[in-house]
Amino acid sequence: MLEDTKKRAAGSRTTTLKAVPFFSQLDDKELEAVRALAAEKHYPKNAVVLTEGEIGDSLYMIQSGKVKVFIGDENGREIILKILGPGAFFGEMSMIDKQPRSASVRTIEASTFLVLTHNAFERCIEQAPRMATVVMRCLAERVREADRKIGTLALMDVYGRVASTLLELAVYSDGKLMVGEKLSQQDLANMVGASREMVNRILKDLTDRGFISIESKEITIVNRELPPSL
Ligand code: CMP
């Protein structure tokens, strides 16, 4: 019975690793080596996992749950950089360069992570050197995404930022284009750098004009040609 439970847990860890781009190209033997080096950690909803500016050297892979990555100021204002779910990872920057954490990470659902320290990661790379190429590709993708975001923040007004953020978050579900995250208007405001009141007005306008519909916090994109401004 205990053996079965252990096997199931090991199986779900392997599934997690396979979904993480760093490890998706490894064969079963290499995955087994990584799994043996990774520790499983559980966090309740709303728990701080990483704090911006703190020293840390571990990589976190999301097995289940969801987190938000954000930067904040001393007045409690925050900008959400990204919401991440199963298969995604975070903490790779400090794991690689051992500099302080570039952002904070907090759970928005109870979450389970596989955690790999810098030393363990180096051992993984020794065992599977092609992983280094994948790491570089992932970092390049993150810089590209950050560039796109800087462009959006600098060149669009709030209306356009809300529209492009909704499209960025939207995924098809049952034939409908839906914003997968149940975001509060404050979350959305924190993603686009605007006030909650402003976001509320824009969502109402987009609803009135038939571009989106909102039901119990779930936003459906009715017409994906969202206008970039009023
Ligand atoms: P690290 O700096 O170790 O700790 C905070 C983590 O947040 C960072 O690694 C990345 O994993 C993640 N992070 C930082 N900036 C972004 C971003 N713009 N988009 C997605 N994730 C990010």
Image (cartoon, grey):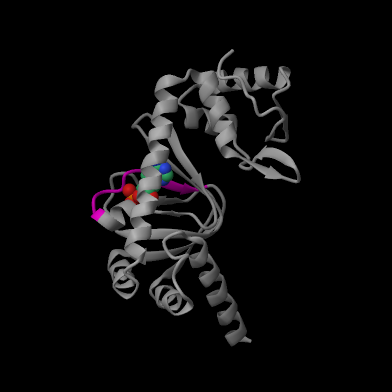
Q: How many marks?
A: 0
Side of 115 relative to 211 (left or right): left
Q: Is residue 104 in view from this perspective?
A: no
What residue appears at the point 40 percent right and 73 percent down from the top-left corner? 34
Residue 128 is situated, as x and y percent measured from the top left of the image, at 35, 72
What residue appears at the point 41 percent right and 76 percent down from the top-left corner? 30
- Say which quarter of the image contains residue 39: bottom left
- Say which quarter of the image contains residue 159: top right
Q: Is residue 72 in view from this perspective?
A: yes
Q: Which residues are magenta?
A: 97-107
What residue appears at the point 73 percent right and 39 percent down from the top-left corner? 176
Residue 46 is situated, as x and y percent measured from the top left of the image, at 51, 48
Q: Quadrant of the C terminus?
A: top right
- Say which quarter of the image contains residue 146: top left
Side of 65 relative to 138 (left or right): right
The residue nearer to you, when weighing 70 against 119, is 119
Residue 191 in the magenta stretch? The answer is no
Relative to 181, residue 121 above or below: below
Residue 99 in the magenta stretch? The answer is yes
Relative to 181, residue 211 above or below: above
Q: Quadrant of the N terminus?
A: bottom right
Relative to 206, residue 82 above or below: below
The residue nearer to you, when weighing 183 against 73, is 183
Residue 216 is situated, as x and y percent measured from the top left of the image, at 72, 35
Residue at the far top in the pictured view: 230
Residue 63 is situated, as x and y percent measured from the top left of the image, at 53, 62
What residue appears at the point 52 percent right and 58 percent down from the top-left corner? 87
The residue nearer to you, when weighing 223 against 101, is 223
